[in-house]
């Protein structure tokens, strides 16, 4: 039997937005790489953060998976662009699934996108932590008190 997909899935599958890769060593880039154990599909989603505003300036993905996973990651990259990280953390897979009218058996595909967003942010935060420590110059106590 032919499987019925919502036109948005077909659209994102045929014309996926923001396919690509950023340099994962770029300190402004966060990389989320997640897999779905049930089907073996893998999704990589990356964000590029504008250091001035703290907003996600750009996003891209590469997904080795089903049409729903490709569509979910394509939607996810569109939704995260231009947003603050806290806003993005509240994106739920159920919203993506609803937007694409995914059937229940395909919910895990949108879950992959939610997980990938969270993983990308976590990676960015972890990197930032490292860089801050590396660049931090110890401030003498007397000077610190002046400011
Ligand atoms: Fe596993 Fe879609 S079937 S991600």
Image: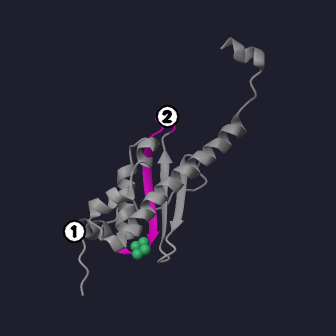
The residue singled out by tag 2 in the image is 52
Spot occupied by residue 55 in the image (x, y as percentages of width and height): 44, 40
Quadrant in which the N terminus is drawn: bottom left
Residue 36 disc label: none
Residue 7 disc label: 1
The colour style of the image is one colour
Tell me, yes or no, whether the highlighted magenta stretch contains residue 55.
yes
Horizontal relation, residue 36 to residue 24: left or right: left
| Residue 112, above or below 105 | above
Q: Secondary structure at mark 1?
A: helix
Q: Quadrant of residue 114?
A: bottom left
Tell me, yes or no, whether the highlighted magenta stretch contains residue 48.
no
| Residue beneath the point at 45% across and 64% down | 112
Judge depth for marks 2 and 1 and give the one in front: 1
| Residue beneath the point at 23% across and 77% down | 4
Tell me the crowding category of disc 2: few under 14, some 14 to 19, or many 20 or more residues within 10 angstroms, Cα based: few
Disc 2 residue: CB within 8 Å of ligand 1: no
Spot occupied by residue 5 in the image (x, y as percentages of width and height): 25, 73
| 109 or 53: nearer the viewer | 109
| Residue beneath the point at 35% across and 54% down | 78
Q: Disc 2 or 1, which lies upstream in sequence?
A: 1
**Ligand 1 occupies quarter:** bottom left
| 86 or 20: nearer the viewer | 86
| Residue beneath the point at 39% across and 55% down | 77
Tell me the crowding category of disc 1: few under 14, some 14 to 19, or many 20 or more residues within 10 angstroms, Cα based: few
Q: How many marks?
A: 2
Horizontal relation, residue 30 to residue 132: left or right: left
In magenta, the rendered stretch is: 51-67
Spot occupied by residue 53 in the image (x, y as percentages of width and height): 46, 35
Spot occupied by residue 26 in the image (x, y as percentages of width and height): 58, 50
């Amino acid at each position: 039997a032919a499987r019925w997909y919502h036109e948005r899935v077909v659209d994102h599958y045929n014309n996926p937005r923001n396919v690509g890769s950023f340099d994962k060593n770029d300190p402004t880039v966060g990389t989320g790489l997640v897999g779905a154990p049930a089907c073996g599909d893998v999704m990589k989603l990356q964000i590029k953060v504008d250091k001035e505003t703290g907003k996600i300036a750009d996003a891209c993905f590469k997904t080795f998976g089903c049409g729903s996973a490709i569509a979910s990651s394509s939607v996810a990259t569109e939704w995260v662009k231009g947003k603050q990280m806290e806003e993005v953390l509240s994106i739920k897979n159920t919203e993506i699934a609803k937007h694409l009218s995914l059937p229940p058996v395909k919910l895990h595909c949108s879950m992959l996108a939610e997980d990938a967003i969270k993983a990308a942010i976590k990676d960015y935060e972890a990197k930032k932590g490292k860089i801050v420590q590396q660049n931090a110059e110890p401030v003498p106590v007397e000077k610190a008190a002046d400011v």
